[in-house]
Amino acid sequence: MPTTTKKDLIDRIAEQTGQKRTAVKKTIQSFLDNVIFELSEGNRLEFRDFGVFEIKNRAPRMAQNPKTLERVPVPAKKTVKFKVGRMMKAALENKTSNNSVAPDKTPKLEPATTDSST
C-alpha cells in the first residue's frame, strides 16, 4: 500500500486550486497546528461528513513482557480517537467493493479569486 505524504497533498492541492505551493503549505500546516492545539485543550473536533477527533482516556493496566513474561504496569494515558464520517465511510466502502477509484473522480477546485470591490 503506497504512502501519501504531506508534501504530496500540498502539491496536489496547489495544482488543483492554482495557488502557490508555499501558500498551500502554510494553510495546511496552520490547520494541523490548530487541530493539535484543540485536541491538547481537550476539545472535540467535528468535521461534518469527514469525521470526529476526540480525546479518550485509557485506564492504567497490567501488561506482560512477551519475552520474559514479566508483568509490567502501563500507566493511564490520553489518546486520540477518530470516528469516520458518512462521506469517508461511503468512499471507503466504494473503494473496497470496486477495488479502484477513478482518478477523474478527484474534486477539481477552482482557483481562489479575490474580489477587489470590497
Image: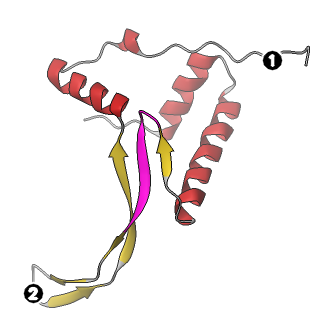
Alpha carbons under labels 1 and 2: distance apart? 64 Å
Write the residue at 38% across / 12% down: 105
Write the residue at 60% across / 23% down: 14
Q: Which residue is more in the foreground, 52 or 97? A: 52
Q: Which residues are the magenta region?
A: 48-56
Write the residue at 24% across / 88% down: 73
Q: Position of residue 13 (x, y in %)?
A: 56, 25
Along the horizontal axis of the image, is 37 left or right of 105?
right
Q: Which mark is residue 114?
A: 1
Q: Which residue is more in the foreground, 26 or 82? A: 82
Q: Position of residue 106 (x, y in %)?
A: 42, 16
Looking at numbered disc 2 in the image, what kind of residue is underneath it? Thr
Write the residue at 18% across / 18% down: 98
* Dominant SS type (magenta): strand
How many C-alpha atoms fall within 10 Å of the one at disc 2: few (<14), some, or many (≥20)? few
> Which residue lies under the disc numbered 2?
68
Looking at marks 1 and 2 on the same chain, the residue that comes earlier in the sequence is marked by 2
Q: How is the image coloured?
A: secondary structure
Q: How many marks?
A: 2
Q: Is residue 9 magenta?
A: no
Looking at numbered disc 1 in the image, what kind of residue is underneath it? Thr
**Image quarter in which the N terminus is found:** top left
